[in-house]
Image: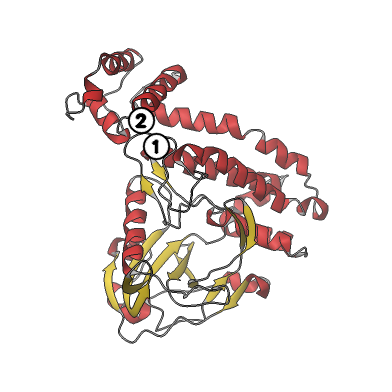
């Protein structure tokens, strides 16, 4: 089959989105298509031609979402400036946003041209594919379709459209946008999001508190997974924080090689706000902004802001628990309670700036790499201590 759309987002207040039309593309060509994802979505690849994937053959009217966000700490009203949702595809009881990125201008484009380059869209395709195979919750890329455009960035490149798939594109910034409008829409919108992502919470006594709790937990799990593989997202603005912990918007991101908590890959992040080592405190800051967006619910329901603050107070302990459990597993430690060794290991990484990924491979299989840092007595002592605290068969 082709897409089976049932777009419930259109049932919300019309100020939350704009109805849009993808740009016209005379000769779209598929560069790459993810047939594994096609199968997961129950799609017939024979019917997914370039015209369908580029939004030229439409099953319903697409929408661009409005949202706000704190970008590098400053609040601004935003929206999908070069993206639009073709529809919500329903398969086997699950719902997925099918979004086009680079599909033309929208009412939220500002001075942007609405286009994307084939290199940047292929980059997102590859990153999302890699992250999924690293067992990290992520958006997925269905296809990259080359367009007729010549897109001017640092140089002129062919244009492309990315077909992105997510559980939804609702983000912390969407809540900020709704809350800033000072209307009665926030409670209705929050109920919609709970219905869509966390319907089991309606059985809880403190539904909105539990909602904040699961959003925080999913975000902690996401960022801990980033730290596990040395991933630097690069643009942890509140508009890039998914409400259900999906990593998305692969812009100035990369995997860190040599361990340095100040590592950044964004040319505009001059002060390292979103550096590798700052992703944890930035997550806490973003969650505080999300809690503030939910604050109007305190006057519309039995929720109190103090309950949200109490959940925020749990952040550090919960992040620590998740992080240390991850690091002990990554180091192959078969039992809990080895936080002191993890701290010693991290201090060694900070001091030596050793290659993050290669270090774990070298711990498991000595002399894999001809790197002087792995030939030191201090590294051998670390490995001996690791064996003493219960090294399992292998590291991960």
Q: Is residue 238 left or right of residue 146?
A: right
Is 76 or 268 nearer to us in this picture? Answer: 268
Determine which residue is flagged by label 2.
330
Q: Residue at x 44, y 82 (%)?
A: 23
Which quadrant of the structure image shows residue 164? bottom left
Q: What numbered label is drawn on residue 284? A: none
Query: The N terminus appears in which quarter of the rendering?
Result: bottom left
Residue 223 lies, in percent from the top left, at 48, 42
Q: Nearer the viewer, residue 65 or 206?
A: 65
Q: Position of residue 169 (x, y in %)?
A: 52, 62
Q: Is residue 380 left or right of residue 318?
A: left
Observer-nearest of 6 and 172? 172
Horizontal and vertical percent for residue 306? 77, 39
Tags 2 and 1 in contact by the CB under 8 Å rule?
yes
Looking at the rendered structure, the secondary structure element under dot 1 is: helix
The location of residue 296, given as percent across then percent down, is 77, 54
Determine whether 58 is above or below 245 in the image.
Answer: below
The residue beneath circle 1 is 228
């Amino acid at each position: 089959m082709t897409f089976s759309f049932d777009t419930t987002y259109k049932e919300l207040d019309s100020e939350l989105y704009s109805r849009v039309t993808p740009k016209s593309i005379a000769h779209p060509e598929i560069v790459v298509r993810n047939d594994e994802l096609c199968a997961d979505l129950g799609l017939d690849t024979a019917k997914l031609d370039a015209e369908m994937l580029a939004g030229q053959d439409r099953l319903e009217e697409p929408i661009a979402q409005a949202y706000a966000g704190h970008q590098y700490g400053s609040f601004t009203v935003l929206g999908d400036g070069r993206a639009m949702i073709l529809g919500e595809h329903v398969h086997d009881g699950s719902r997925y946003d099918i979004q086009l990125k680079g599909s033309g201008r929208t009412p939220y484009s500002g001075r942007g041209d609405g286009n994307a380059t084939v290199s940047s869209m292929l980059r997102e395709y590859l990153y999302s594919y890699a992250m999924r195979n690293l067992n990290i919750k992520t958006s997925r890329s269905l296809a990259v379709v080359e367009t007729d455009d010549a897109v001017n960035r640092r140089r002129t490149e062919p244009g492309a459209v990315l077909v992105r798939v997510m559980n939804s594109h609702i983000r912390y910034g969407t809540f900020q946008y709704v809350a800033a409008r000072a209307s009665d829409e926030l409670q209705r919108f929050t109920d919609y999001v709970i219905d869509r992502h966390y319907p089991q919470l309606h059985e809880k006594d403190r539904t909105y508190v539990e909602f904040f709790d699961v959003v925080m937990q999913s975000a902690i799990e996401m960022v801990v997974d980033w730290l596990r593989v040395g991933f630097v997202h690069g643009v942890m603005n509140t508009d890039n924080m998914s409400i259900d912990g999906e990593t998305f918007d692969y812009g100035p991101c990369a995997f860190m090689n040599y361990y340095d908590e100040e590592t950044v890959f964004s040319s505009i992040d001059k002060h390292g706000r979103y550096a590798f080592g700052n992703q944890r405190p930035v997550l806490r800051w973003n969650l505080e902004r999300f809690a503030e967006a939910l604050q109007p619910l305190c006057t519309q329901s039995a929720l109190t802001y103090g309950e949200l603050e109490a959940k925020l107070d749990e952040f550090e302990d919960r992040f620590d628990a998740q992080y240390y459990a991850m690091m002990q597993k990554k180091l192959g430690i078969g039992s809990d309670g080895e936080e002191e060794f993890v701290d010693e290991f991290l201090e060694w990484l900070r001091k030596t700036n050793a290659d993050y990924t290669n270090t774990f491979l070298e711990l498991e299989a000595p002399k894999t790499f001809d790197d002087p840092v792995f030939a030191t007595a201090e590294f051998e002592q670390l490995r001996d201590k690791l064996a003493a605290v219960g090294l399992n068969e292998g590291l991960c």
